[in-house]
Amino acid sequence: MSSELLRMTGIVKQFPGVRALDGVDLDVRSGEVHCLLGQNGAGKSTLIRVLSGAHQPDQGTIVVDGNEASFGSPADAMKLGIATIYQELDLVQDLTVAENVFLGHEPARFGFTNRTEIVGRTRELLRGLGHGEIPPGRRVGALPAAGQQVVSMARALSRDARLIIMDEPSAVLDSEEVANLFRVIRGLTERGVAVVYISHRLEEIREIGDRVTVLKDGATVATGLPAKETPTTELIRLMTGRSIEYVFPPRRAIPPDAEVVLKVEGLSRPREFENIGFEVRAGEVLGLAGLVGSGRSEILETLYGARRAATGEVYVDGRRLRPGQVAAAVRAGIGLAPEERKSQALLLDESVYRNITVSSLARFATTGFLNRRAERDAAEELTTALDVRPAGVDRPVRNLSGGNQQKVVLARWLLRDCRVLLLDEPTRGVDVGARAEIYALVRRLAESGVAVVLVSSEVEEVLGLADRVVVLREGRAVFSGPADEIDEHRVLDLVMEGSVV
Ligand SMILES: Nc1ncnc2c1ncn2[C@@H]1O[C@H](COP(=O)(O)OP(=O)(O)OP(=O)(O)O)[C@@H](O)[C@H]1O
């Protein structure tokens, strides 16, 4: 029988102007996966920062193993066995795996760190997590995101963590890596470790979760729900307060004579992708499916001119694009909403509206002066459509929750007049309500004549939103055709085994 490990009651956290948590309750049992659900801005990250000692609550109690606890810092939480694996992993990229695992708590003999011991213990921990293939001596920066996550877990276990909080761990993983992550999580819970799991992908909750707590506007609206039995529609209703049809907007048949807006021929870059060719017509959404490392993001970046193709041609509206020049791509009307939005795109101290209009300022400066009113109106329209919270386009982007920041960058690209819009993981970290809005907006853009190329690690999203699909495996197209001629199983078979087309 699992026992109660943690109980949080009536947690309140006030930021200037925003009550991020307004009386949250949460209890976690050892050996369970407890999922935390809520729309963007509901308070999930703030709650786990309180639990991990990074924020001090203004009110409320935290009880661990039956004793009231107060955490002045993450080190205090760690002493009680509570560790957090943030989305932006806090590993030191230039140190080795073993050095990261034992950073700050190296076993020392006679004052010296014992290298052999930390390497040996790291190897044991990695094996215990089913990842004995990760070399303890490898530089962490050389590992893919999935490997780095495993290192963070080994780090937590090296400090005897009994409760590991994972903030959207699957957001940076593809389907195969998610399956691996779930194996690791099951191994942890078998040893009695509790996991608090945050994700916006509801199908994952059902697969890995035991119980669910739903937050809305900083308060607990339901707690301890059985993850496998609670219907998805009920979870959505609890999160959003309304029922949302989790469906993709209907496709319209593309007329056979619709003009080809984007044409790609024989595009290759050594070790990234080879001989990629496709056409996207006005009104069409083309989806690229494949695992991380299949070349999908690299193809988008090459179309955008940020990488230069070794061979091949790209045409926009029949005109050949100069390779490897972002300025030329932008002039031709190509826009790229990149995957790593935070590092690549946001002006954190600027207002929400300026972040949205920054790539379209010419449109608001027809008289030589910026028409701030028009700028704000345009931004407001998009933030309302995407339900950016809290409302108000004058706030600095820095204070928005992660998912709301995503929406802001996406809004920027939706506002720009593009001929070709390249979307890399447009719904990563975005809640279920806003996803439906994003799908509808992408469809509307396509219908207005834009050619859209979509990359997503969620196969369901590629198949649901795209008209045509290219499936990639190790940089080669292993399928190309209409989305309704292929299903999810077939895509997964293709990306994993690369069987015949
Ligand atoms: N440092 C801060 N200053 C001001 N407001 C903040 C700060 N941190 C968070 N907030 C606000 O607190 C609320 C809760 O944010 P939080 O990041 O906890 O949401 P979340 O549920 O994790 O969202 P997401 O799914 O987008 O990650 C939001 O309204 C956010 O804008």
Image (tube, rainbow, N blue to C red):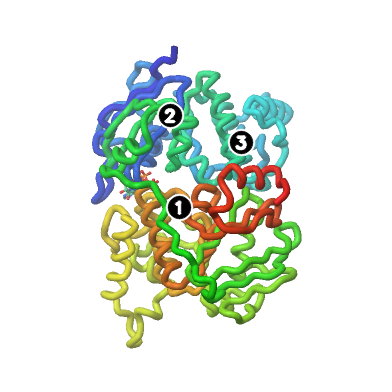
Between the residue at mark 1 and the residue at mark 2, the CA separation in whole angstroms equals 32 Å
**Element under disc 1:** loop
* Residue 208 as seen in the image, left or right of residue 279: left
Q: Position of residue 162 (x, y in %)?
A: 49, 23
Q: Position of residue 147 (x, y in %)?
A: 63, 40
Q: Residue at x 32, y 61 (%)?
A: 383
Q: Earlier in the sequence, mark 1 or mark 2?
A: 2
Between the residue at mark 2 and the residue at mark 3, the CA separation in whole angstroms equals 20 Å
Instruction: Say whether residue 258 is visible.
Output: yes
Which residue type does callout 1 highlight? Thr
Query: Which sits in the foreground, 18 or 69?
Result: 18
Dot 1: within a 10 Å radius of its alpha carbon, few (fewer than 14), some, or many (20 or more) residues?
Answer: many
User: Relative to residue 224, is residue 253 depicted above or below?
Assistant: below
User: Relative to residue 290, is residue 80 depicted above or below?
Assistant: above
Instruction: Say whether residue 56 is visible.
Output: no
For disc 3, the marked residue is: 151
Q: Residue at x 44, y 48 (%)?
A: 429
For disc 1, the marked residue is: 427
- Residue 205: quadrant of the picture: top left
Q: Position of residue 148 (x, y in %)?
A: 61, 41
Dot 3: within a 10 Å radius of its alpha carbon, few (fewer than 14), some, or many (20 or more) residues?
Answer: many
Q: Residue 77 got which mark? A: 2
Mark nearer the viewer, 1 or 3:
1
Which residue type does callout 2 highlight? Ala
Residue closest to the far top: 1
Which residue type does callout 3 highlight? Val
Q: Residue 60 got which mark? A: none
- Residue 444: quadrant of the picture: bottom left
Q: Earlier in the sequence, mark 2 or mark 3?
A: 2
Q: Determine if the C-beta at disc 1 is less than 8 A from ligand 1.
A: no
Q: Earlier in the sequence, mark 1 or mark 3?
A: 3
